Amino acid sequence: LITTYNTTATKKFLRDNAVLAVVVISDEEDCGEVGDVTEGINGIKDDVCYYAANGQGPDGAYSDPKEGRLYKLEPLLNYYDFLMDLKGGRTGYVKFAAVTGMADESDPSSTQITFTSDAPDADKVPSCSTPDCQSDFGYCDAYPGTRYIDLAKMFGDNGFVGTICTNNFSDLLNRIVDFVGCPRYFNLSEKIVDPALANIFVNDVEIPRYSCSGSSNDNIEICAGPSDDTCTSGQCVKTWTYTSPDELDPPDPNAPGGKITFADHYNPCDLISEGVIHIDVVYAAQ
């Protein structure tokens, strides 16, 4: 990424007001910058990347046996700072997604690097295997990508992790699209008591209850409801709809207050301020 960016063409491609999305897909560990480790020493080959990512070899040594080079890699903070600097340090303008080997997708941070023995040249142990996959050469296995996972964690809500050990990537890709782009729905922390009396504000901007489906954020056309036939383009539809937590199928523990879903023609992410979206509910008396 760093090498690719340092070209005139690539620099021009990076737009100042666009979100930078970085998606890493790997069945192995990050091996740092070129020269961080020496592969092929005493037969350990690429396993040295895992020794360095782990901070020590299987035998507890902190450096390789031939060169005496410490087992360490480019600090993840340098990667983070590099990506953030590309967007002027603005939170939310960089999104980092990692699809890699992990032991438990529900708890990626539990993934650890382990070895087959405590021999100085021991092999690394896979973190997961693709379901229903058969191979005599280990092609079904993926190895722990702890550095990718940790880097995603550094980005907080703007970091995403998913397991590469799957035989159907459709759901994972849909999740990445939602993560990278603007999702159509947003989870709420509290229930909306009376949706009929609720007014929705996104980052202090009131969202019209009804608008014409042929309009856009740049030229939103407000209308009165489904029976309103005055739209110059499209039909009068709800700009947002509310789904209570009891109505969610399947239930979503991440949405204790239910979900707000925006119509296809309305993009709430246009209202992003410093990478953050606040959704407020204000009730109006009838």
Image (cartoon, rainbow, N blue to C red):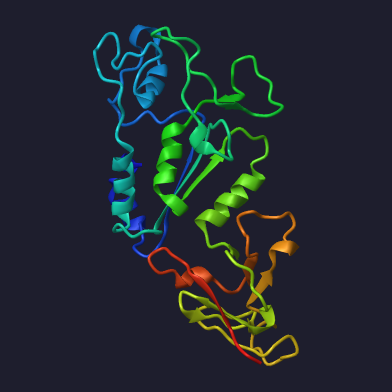
Q: Is residue 231 left or right of residue 115?
A: right
| Quadrant location, the C terminus | bottom right
Q: Is residue 26 visible?
A: no
Identify the residue at image location x=73%, y=63%: 246
Please tell me which residue is depicted at 48% across the width and 69% down the height of the picture. Answer: 278
Residue 24 visible in rendering: yes
Q: Is residue 65 left or right of residue 137?
A: left
Residue found at the very far left of the displayed protein: 68
Within the image, what quadrant is residue 30 found in? top left
Residue closer to the observer: 127 or 237? 127
Tell me how many marks there are: 0
120 lies left or right of 114: left
Rendered location of residue 218, percent (x, y): 49, 80
Give the residue displayed 43% in from the left and 65% down from the top: 276
Q: Is residue 81 above or below residue 186?
A: above
The image shows residue 37 at horizontal and vertical percentages of 31, 22
| Residue 94 screen position, x and y as percent | 40, 54
- As drawn, 208 above or below 115: below
Rendered-image quadrant of the N terminus: top left
Quadrant of res 152:
top left
Placement of 71 over or under 176, stated as above or below: above
Question: What percent of the width, then of the height, locates residue 166?
Answer: 64, 35
> What residue is rendered at 41% in x and 22% in y?
50
